[in-house]
């Protein structure tokens, strides 16, 4: 079954570098798959178990999925490249939601939000104090932890520069380039800490460890890199207020209202 087995990431696995696996049959040759299943009785039994569970469901949509028991109920996996993964639930004690790029070969669970074709600009904006202040204000909660979502958080967040189009002038181009450079530094510093741990014979730090709250910060270079990123993002917005969530969110809500008003006049 090796060729059908893929790494699988829920939020817990993503944040803590835990291994989990799944059977993945999407886009495979069905004739070849059926030939292979004759040699894989345990896999056949798993598929049959899924079929039985779906047939027994009281939900009509789930009943229909019993016709394809070898497939996930929802497939949103990018076909190639990398995607940006953000856990849907993150501790209230973190200043920044941990996020990272993941290969399309790794299957993303519904415990995470994924952004295909995300650029360094996306990563930089979403990893900034500005975005995290907005997220802490509007996101849902699971107990006291933040629950990230596309509908409430991402889709309503006003970017300083359009994410899907090239900058229109030199000033915008420079602002975007500074954000991308600072975002890359955050990724580079994380990797430097991981490599340093390996060289010392230690387990590399996880994303959860990078972004936990500490009495004595063990990753000062990462804190410095995030501060530089925040500065670049603030400059792109033209934001000159302090670092409080209250002031940042008031600024963003004002910007959101301006964008909504502009959209209505078009």
Image: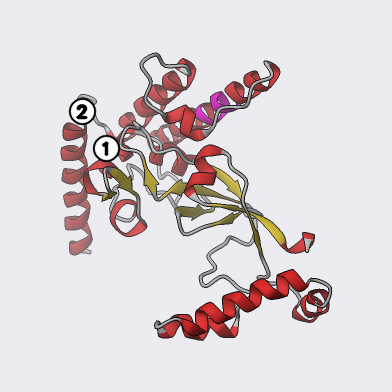
Q: Which residue is mark 1?
A: 133
Q: Position of residue 200 (x, y in %)?
A: 67, 15
**Residue 210, magenta (yes or no):** no
SS state under label 2: loop
Residue at horizontal 84 percent and vertical 73 percent from the top: 39
Residue nearest the observer in this picture, 79 or 262: 79
* Residue 70 falls left or right of residue 158: right
* Closer to the camera in the image, 153 or 264: 153
Where is residue 51? Give x, y as percent. Answer: 58, 80
Count of numbered circles on the image: 2
Where is residue 159 shown, x and y percent of the image?
A: 33, 45
- Image position of 99 (left or right of 29): left
Residue 119 appears in the figure: no
Q: Quadrant of the C terminus?
A: bottom left
Query: Mark 2 sits on what residue?
Result: 244
Towards the viewer: 260 or 18: 18
For label 1, count other residues whose C-alpha is less than 10 Å away and answer few (under 14), some (14-19) or many (20+). many
User: Around disc 2, counting alpha carbons within 10 Å, would you say few (fewer than 14), some (14 to 19), or many (20 or more)?
Assistant: few
Residue 175, quarter of the rendered image: top left
What element does badge 1 sit on? helix
Q: Disc 1 and disc 2: Cα gap in Å?
A: 8 Å
Percent of width and height locating residue 70:
64, 75
- Disc 1 or 2, which lies upstream in sequence? 1
Q: Quadrant of residue 161?
A: top left
Question: Residue at the spot x=50%, y=48% of the render?
Answer: 85
Question: Which residues fall within the magenta stretch?
Answer: 186-191
Query: Residue at 47% across / 34% down in the picture?
Result: 208
Give the main secondary structure of the magenta stretch: helix
**Is residue 262 in view from this perspective?**
yes
């Amino acid at each position: 079954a090796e060729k059908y087995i893929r790494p699988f990431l829920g939020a817990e696995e993503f944040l803590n570098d835990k291994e989990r696996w799944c059977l993945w049959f999407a886009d495979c040759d069905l004739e070849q798959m059926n030939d292979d299943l004759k040699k894989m009785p345990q896999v056949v039994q798993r598929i049959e178990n899924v079929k039985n569970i779906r047939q027994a469901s009281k939900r009509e949509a789930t009943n229909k999925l019993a016709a394809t028991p070898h497939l996930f109920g929802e497939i949103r996996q990018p076909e190639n490249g990398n995607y940006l993964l953000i856990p849907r639930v993150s501790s209230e004690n973190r200043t920044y939601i941990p996020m990272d790029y993941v290969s399309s070969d790794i299957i993303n669970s519904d415990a995470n939000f994924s952004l295909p074709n995300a650029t360094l600009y996306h990563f930089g904006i979403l990893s900034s104090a500005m975005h995290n202040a907005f997220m802490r204000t509007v996101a849902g909660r699971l107990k006291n932890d933040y629950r990230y979502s596309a509908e409430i958080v991402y889709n309503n967040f006003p970017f300083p520069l359009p994410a899907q189009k090239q900058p229109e002038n030199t000033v915008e181009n420079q602002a975007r380039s500074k954000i991308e450079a600072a975002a890359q530094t955050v990724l580079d510093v994380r990797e430097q800490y991981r490599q340093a741990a390996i060289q010392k014979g230690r387990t590399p730090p996880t994303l959860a460890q990078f972004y936990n709250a500490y009495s004595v910060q063990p990753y000062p270079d990462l804190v410095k890199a995030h501060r530089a990123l925040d500065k670049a993002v603030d400059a792109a917005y033209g934001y000159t207020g302090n670092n409080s969530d209250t002031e940042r969110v008031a600024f963003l809500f004002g910007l959101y209202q301006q964008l909504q008003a502009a959209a209505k006049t078009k």
